[in-house]
Image: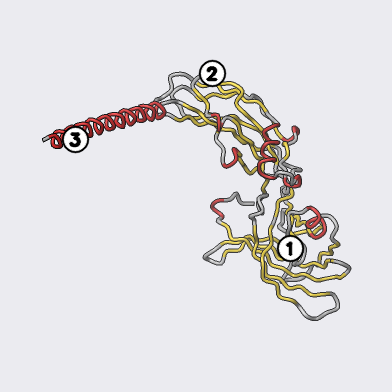
Amino acid sequence: MGKLIKKTNMRRSFRKYTAIVALAALSISCDRDEVFTREQYKNVFALVSGSGNVASKFHDLGGESAGYVAASLGGTNPTANPIEINLIEDPSLIDAYNKINFDVDVSKYGRPLPASKYDIETYSFTIPAGEISGRLPIRIRPDGLSPDSSYFIPLRVESHSSYEVNPEKSYLLYQVRTKNYWAKADGNTIYSMRAKLRQDGSTFELQLPGSKIMHPISEREVRIMVGNETYSSEVGVFNRGAIILRIGEDNKVTILPYKDVEILQIDGDKDYPNTFSIEDDGFKTYKTFLLHYYFRMSGTVYEMKEELRLEFDPDEEVKL
């Protein structure tokens, strides 16, 4: 009988313990739900940016264009008050970005955008009451910027009139990148190449399938590597072996040295007439260069005939 009573008491204690644990778990769950609900409805704004708090935009060479810094508001409840946001420039943001991403590799460091290249009329903007976004306009003049450097305007929230700001998104680096009709300064404009390379004095032509990276230099100029030289982001490499293609209003191309390479353009070749054109084969559309030139590399003279093609969608681009 004593053993039966003991077992009964143990069962009662266990049920009591289980009920206490269940109540505690229910309480924790309710607390979490309450916190989640509060967070879900809380109005918090953030500056809109991508990875590393960088907001990047391409700007056309050849004039002035507009960019924007945007703020976005979270939360399910509509705001009753406007949010006045005041920004300031903070150069330390560029220093931090460089150290985190490149450590001691100074050659890859981002730079402040020169003051002559942009205007910010006011550093204040508003998310109106009941709305979820607002933006600050910036006027950008990208001519003269190098396609090989990163340029930033570092901005952070100095103050705001109401609600909350997400501290992890309370700052950004507005990155100015350049482009023209033929290329973007991101290293991803890659033309397919079909070429013929001949050493001066030889009758043998080397067939060169491959590709070339193209960078914008000015409104109507782009840069490629000469011959079959491989592109590298190292300054010494493209200074030694890069050339400029200057595209005229009539789409005639003038070939010029970028820095050190010796170049001689050959005109009058009907197959490689030094021109730019748009080709449509009925299925795809291409931007096409046909080039013919001599160049000297390491004391040797070569003749280069090349076709460069880039498939594109004309509906997505502004025509010449």
Q: In terms of secondary structure, where does tag 3 sit? A: helix
The crowding category of the residue bearing disc 1, from other C-alpha atoms within 10 Å (few below 14, some 14 to 19, many at least 20), is some
- The reply, left or right, for residue 209 in relation to residue 285 is right
Q: Which residue has dot 2 on it?
A: 161
Q: Nearer the viewer, mark 3 or mark 1?
A: 3
- Image colouring: secondary structure
Between disc 2 and disc 1, whose residue precedes?
2
Q: Secondary structure at mark 2?
A: loop
Q: Nearer the viewer, residue 77 or 284?
A: 77
Residue ID for mark 1 = 230
Helix or strand or loop: what does disc 1 sit on? loop
Characterize the local packing of mark 2: few (<14), some (14-19) or many (20 or more) Cα atoms within 10 angstroms: few
Is 2 situated left or right of 128 in this image?
left
| Label 3 – label 2 distance at C-alpha | 60 Å
- Residue pictured at 76% horizontal, 43% vertical: 144
Amino acid type of the residue that numbered disc 1 sits on in the rendered structure: Thr
Residue 268 image point, x, y percent: 78, 69
Residue denoted by label 3 = 11
Q: Residue furthest bottom?
A: 203
Q: Are marks 3 and 2 in contact (CB under 8 Å)?
A: no
Q: Quadrant of residue 96?
A: top right
Q: Residue at x 43, y 19 (%)?
A: 80
The amino acid type of the residue labelled 2 equals: Ser
Compute the Cα span from label 3 to label 1.
80 Å
The reply, left or right, for residue 226 in relation to residue 177 is: right
Q: Position of residue 303 (x, y in %)?
A: 80, 71
Residue at the outermost left position: 1
Nearest to viewer (mark 3 / mark 2): 3
Tell me if label 3 and label 1 are in contact, CB under 8 Å: no
Mark 3 or mark 1, which has the lower sequence index?
3
Q: Amino acid at mark 3?
A: Arg
Q: x, y (%) of residue 269?
A: 76, 71
